Structures are given as C-alpha cells and as structure tokens.
Image (cartoon, rainbow, N blue to C red):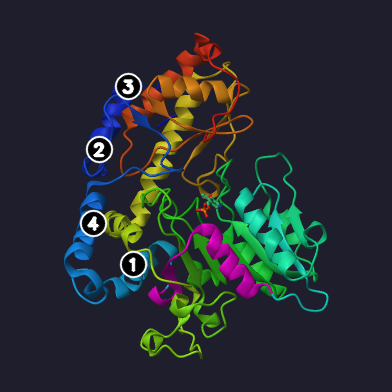
C-alpha cells in the first residue's frame, strides 16, 4: 500500500476477502459484538480444542488406568506426540522438544541444569525489561548457589525504556558471565531480539545461552537448532491457544543430551526403564529428561488441537499474515490517531517486531477500561501501554479498522474520563 492512499473500511474488507486465514476464523469461538485483541495474553478457544478435551475426558471415563497405553492418544506417549507436532514451530528435532511444566517451572529446571558457576564465571546475564517471573526465578537460582542476586544478576539496561540493543547485551558478555537468559520477544514493546547473533556471540565467549519464547511461539518462526541455542522455554496459552494455564514447553539442544537435569523425577527416566521402579535413575537421552512428574494429560488436550491447526496453516504463513495485519494496524494508527496522544512503542521494522502492537498513551489504563466497555478486548501493562494483538488465525482487517476507530472515539470524545485511574487486579 502506498503511504498516501487513505485506508478505508472498504479497503479493510477487501483485504479480508483476499485473506487465506478467513477459513480459520470459524474454527474459533468468537463472541458476538466483541473484538478480541488479547491473543498475545490468552489465545481464544478453538472448536477442535473442545473436541480434544472431550475426547481425553472420555478416555479417562472409559479406559481409566488403561488410558496410559490405549485409546487414540495413549497418555504415556502424548507428550512425545506433542513434541513432534511442536518441533516445526521451534525449528528443532522432536527429541529436542518437550511439552511439560509451566514456563516458570521450566526456567527453574533449565537454569538449575545449565547455571554452573565456576571460578570467576558466576553471573547470569538478563535484561532490565524482562518479565518479572523470569527475574524472580533467576534470583532464586542464584541464591540456591549461595550467591547474592544483587551482585550476580546483571540486567542489561534499555536506552529508551522500550528496546534492548543487541550491542549492549554483547558488551556485557564478560568472562564473569556463566549463563545468559533473554526473551525472544520483549513482552511490552514487542521487540524481537536477534537470537542467531546473540547465540553466536555468547558461544564465541564460551557462555551458554537460553531464551524465553513466550511471546514468539506461534507468532514468529524459530530455528533454534540451526542457531545452536542451548535451551529455551515457552508457554502454550498465548499465541498457541492452549487454554488458561495450559502445559508449557521446553527445548534443549541435542548436544546436551545425557546431562543430568537440575531437577529430576521419575519422568526424567528412560521411558522403557521408568516402571522398573529402580532407585537408580537412568536419564532419558532427549528433552524428555527435563520432565519431573506425571504429565498433565487433560491440559495437554487443547494443545493437540492447536498444533494441528498450526501444521495445516504453516508458521511461515502465520508470520506473513501477522506482519501484514500488524503493519495495517500501525498504518491506521498513524492515519487516524495523530494528535491524540498515542505513540507506537514497538519497533517498526518487520525483522525486529513480534506479534503485537504496543501503543503508549498517558491515559492507557482508563483507555483500556473504555475499550472493554466498547467491546474491544486489549490488555494493559502499566504505566502506559495498551497491547493489541491482531491474530493471524482469527482477527479480520475490518476488526482492526474498527479497533482503531474505537481508540479514536475514546480520546476524541474523552470517553475514558468516566473511569477510575486504578489498574484492575488482572490487567
Ligand atoms: C507469559 C509469560 C510468563 C508466564 O509464566 P507462567 O509460568 O506461565 O506463569 C513468563 N515469562 C514470560 C516472558 C511471559 O511472557
């Protein structure tokens, strides 16, 4: 689209007609009179997810204990089946991927495995804009090693409060650093870090590096194996539509197979030995070794459905639409919202942004409350961020158009003024 062309509602409808993803809209439970822009926080439920949950409930009802090895999805092998389905989204071999735990528990697992302070190398390198749970986990891992996190957790500073420059991260990769742990996409600004470059630079200095891919999985393709990333974690309830608190994922590069997990349990066993019930653990030679206890079978059910949809749609195509529809939103913001106090806080270049648009406004909290009242579901990150995520699978261009019009009306007509300034408990 040329810059001078005015984007109209008709234009949005035209884009929808050409959009291959229109066929997937009907796969999801969209609410009447509502525009859902929060798929980066909690993806919508798909109809197939409901079917899979019912199917797994039925297997429990009918098969009981025999469900571990019988039925359409024998429970004992379901995590491995999901690893295979998820591997293309990570850019890894199936054996390098496991669907288990939660993001935070997987951080604890993999940091306790790969953070081995030795001599001068005692520090963990992270960044100051990272998600709090990641920081809390790193701090407790440092304490468990007998160190003071105030000294041993380095947080790379942001120059503008939005982005973290790769150059600044690299300049902190000193010989005191034992481990690096960073997000792939920053949860506020949506900045996509150059994972390949950072991995190369870390390895040049003999430092292991892991990533939190919560905000890129299902929105951005990854090539973790090719890039040589040591490990990664992610959740499956954001762009992956796995449902509230659904089971998370982890990746461990195959060069580390056989390493003793920081946290072990009977699910770390070689699968054929697990039921020997021996007190001597024989660690599985795959990412499966990093499981601890029994798989959360019912919470895995929606992920089967989600990964089927991704296999059909193809992650490269998902990324293509995601870039196009977020760009469409940014162009509309520039066209419609000038002078109303909105500022686009995410990087503008395609290669540097994830799947959401980060709109900043001094009245973000009250604008978000007004948006919900007007049928648009955003999320709010204090103090001043409105995150909006048009999702490849189920958001239409027309909905993006209407969202921007709503943002305009709320400020132009001062509709936000009728709401309180306090943040909601869950925002
Ligand atoms: C969503 C998110 C989490 C959430 O962790 P849970 O263990 O699932 O609660 C952690 N880190 C990042 C970067 C996230 O985006």
> Is disc 1 placed on a helix, strand or loop?
helix
Q: Residue at x 62, y 33 (%)?
A: 382
Horizontal and vertical percent for residue 93? 41, 74
Q: Residue at x 65, y 44 (%)?
A: 163
Dots 1 and 4: beta carbons under 8 Å? Answer: no
Instruction: Give the mark nearer the N terminus: 3 vs 1.
Output: 3
**Disc number at residue 18?**
2
Instruction: Give the mark nearer the N terminus: 1 vs 4.
Output: 4
258 displayed left or right of 132: left
In this rendering, the label closer to the viewer, 2 or 4: 4
Q: Quadrant of the N terminus?
A: top left
Q: Nearer the viewer, residue 10 or 383?
A: 383
> Is disc 3 placed on a helix, strand or loop?
helix
272 displayed left or right of 150: left
Instruction: Give the mark nearer the N terminus: 2 vs 3.
Output: 3
Horizontal and vertical percent for residue 225? 49, 72
Instruction: Give the mark nearer the N terminus: 1 vs 2.
Output: 2
Image vertical order of residue 307 relative to residue 256, above or below: above
Residue 112 belongs to the span the image colors magenta: yes
In this rendering, the label closer to the viewer, 1 or 4: 4
Q: Is mark 4 within 8 Å of ligand 1?
A: no
The span picked out in magenta is 93-115
Q: Which residue is mark 3?
A: 9
Instruction: Give the mark nearer the N terminus: 4 vs 3.
Output: 3
Determine the CA span between mark 2 and mark 3: 15 Å
Q: Which residue is mark 4?
A: 52
Dots 2 and 3: beta carbons under 8 Å? Answer: no
């Amino acid at each position: 689209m040329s810059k001078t062309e005015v984007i109209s509602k008709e234009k949005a409808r035209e884009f929808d007609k050409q959009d291959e993803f229109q066929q997937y809209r009907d796969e999801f439970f969209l609410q009447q009179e509502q525009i859902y822009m929060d798929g980066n926080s909690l993806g919508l439920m798909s109809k197939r997810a409901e079917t899979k949950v019912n199917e797994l409930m039925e297997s429990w009802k009918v098969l009981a204990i025999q469900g571990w090895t019988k039925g359409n999805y024998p429970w004992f092998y379901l995590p491995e089946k999901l690893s295979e389905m998820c591997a293309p989204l990570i850019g890894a071999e199936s054996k390098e991927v496991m669907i288990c735990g939660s993001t935070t528990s997987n951080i604890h697992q993999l940091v306790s495995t790969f953070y081995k302070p030795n001599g001068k190398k005692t520090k963990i390198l992270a960044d100051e804009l990272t998600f709090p749970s990641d920081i809390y986990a790193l701090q407790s891992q440092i304490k468990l090693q007998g160190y003071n996190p105030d000294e041993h957790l380095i947080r790379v500073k942001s120059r503008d409060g939005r982005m973290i420059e790769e150059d600044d991260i690299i300049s902190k990769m000193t010989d005191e650093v034992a481990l690096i742990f960073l997000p792939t996409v920053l949860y506020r600004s949506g900045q996509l870090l150059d994972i390949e470059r950072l991995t190369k630079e870390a390895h040049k200095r003999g430092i292991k590096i892991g990533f939190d891919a919560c905000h890129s999985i299902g929105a951005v393709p990854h090539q973790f194996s090719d890039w040589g990333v040591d490990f990664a974690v992610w959740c499956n309830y954001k762009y992956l539509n796995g449902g509230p608190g659904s089971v998370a994922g982890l990746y461990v590069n195959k060069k580390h197979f056989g390493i003793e997990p920081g946290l072990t349990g009977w699910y770390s066993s070689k699968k054929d030995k697990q039921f020997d019930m021996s007190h001597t653990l024989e660690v599985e030679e795959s990412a499966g070794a990093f499981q601890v206890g029994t798989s959360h079978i019912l919470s895995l059910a929606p992920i089967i459905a989600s990964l089927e949809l991704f296999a059909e749609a193809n992650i490269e195509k998902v990324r293509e639409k995601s870039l196009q529809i977020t760009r469409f939103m940014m162009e509309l913001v520039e066209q419609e919202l000038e002078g109303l106090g909105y500022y686009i806080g995410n990087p503008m270049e395609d290669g540097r942004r994830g799947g959401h648009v980060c709109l900043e406004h001094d009245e973000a909290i009250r604008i978000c409350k007004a948006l919900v009242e007007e049928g648009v579901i955003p999320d709010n990150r204090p103090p001043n961020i409105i995150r909006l995520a048009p999702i490849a699978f189920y958001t239409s261009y027309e909905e993006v158009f209407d969202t921007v019009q709503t943002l305009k009306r709320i400020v132009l007509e001062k509709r936000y003024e009728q709401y309180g300034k306090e943040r909601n408990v869950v925002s």
